[in-house]
Image: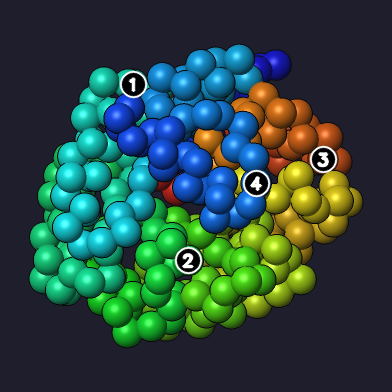
Amino acid sequence: MKNGYRIIDAHAHIYPEKIAQKATLAIGDFYDIKMAMPAGTSSRLKIAGEKAGIDKFVVHSCATNAHQVRAINHFIKAEVEQNKEFIGFMTLHQDLTEEEIKDEIAWCMENGFKGIKLHPDFQKFYIDGEDAEKIYRAVESFNKKFPILFHTGDDRYEYSKPLRLAKMAKKYPSVYFIAAHFGGYRCWDDVEVYKGLDNVYFDTCSSLTFIDKNRAKELIDLLGYEKFFFGVDFPMWDSKEELDRFFKLDLSEKERKAILSGNLTKLLDLKW
């Protein structure tokens, strides 16, 4: 807790110790950005979060092939069981069959996961592609609130453009989607397509370094502060520095409390 605020980091990547440094460097290379942390381990995440006063973390990791899915989900499950501050999001891969996807979601739901994390640019699928729709249909079939957190945007690729996610949100109105990076990394002029979509939420990570604070406030006002979650994108950014950037935004106390923890607590039905 910082300055009386309960804080949830809604977007944190973690990796097993033996591959954490390699995975972290690979992310840095992909985005041509120097990573704040040398390795994305759970212990480093907790240390960075403690310095910033963060109470809870949504943790996840993405599978780059179908064979990795269960191993990664077992890893996240174990980390959540060992760290009471962690909230687990599962991974999936588009090469799984629809039945395999349903089975994996069922297993994860039974084991306390709260949602799904997908990265179309890493995993190389279009958000509105048929292979992705298998996932939305599977989630829809459970008739439960189980949001899908997407990396969205990147002007170098077409996989995760905001228009694609908005299209799927309209087609699957009972599925909850979280569009990371203010709805579209480096595509912030395109995020108006989400306006009025009740099943689409957003996080703030990997954006506040690049967007002018006045423009960030405009986007929050446009899309609704009650739809936003604070996120760091560990290990890419330092938790305290990212939180300091957030507090520079011209937000009311009500808006800050909602974005820092209230909105996500409500969506995920979290207990404090």
Q: Amino acid at mark 2?
A: Asp
Which type of secondary structure does the marked residue at label 3 adopt? loop
User: Is there a contact, CB below 8 Å, between mark 1 and mark 2?
Assistant: no
Mark 4 = which residue? 33
Name the residue rendered at 22%, 72% in the picture.
Answer: 95
Mark 1, residue position: 84
The part of the image, by quadrant, that contains residue 102 is bottom left
Q: Amino acid at mark 3?
A: Leu
- Relative to 149, residue 156 above or below: below
Q: Secondary structure at mark 1?
A: loop
- Which of the two discs, 4 and 2, sits closer to the camera? 4
Q: Quadrant of the N terminus?
A: top right
Left/right of residue 269 with respect to residue 97 in the rendered view: right
Characterize the local packing of mark 3: few (<14), some (14-19) or many (20 or more) Cα atoms within 10 angstroms. Answer: some
- Which residue position is annotated with label 2? 121
Cα–Cα span, label 4 and label 2: 16 Å
* N-term-proximal mark, 3 vs 1: 1
> How far across and how far down the image is residue 187, in percent?
69, 68
Q: Are marks 3 and 2 in contact (CB under 8 Å)?
A: no
Report the amino acid beneath label 4: Ile
Q: Quadrant of the C terminus?
A: top left
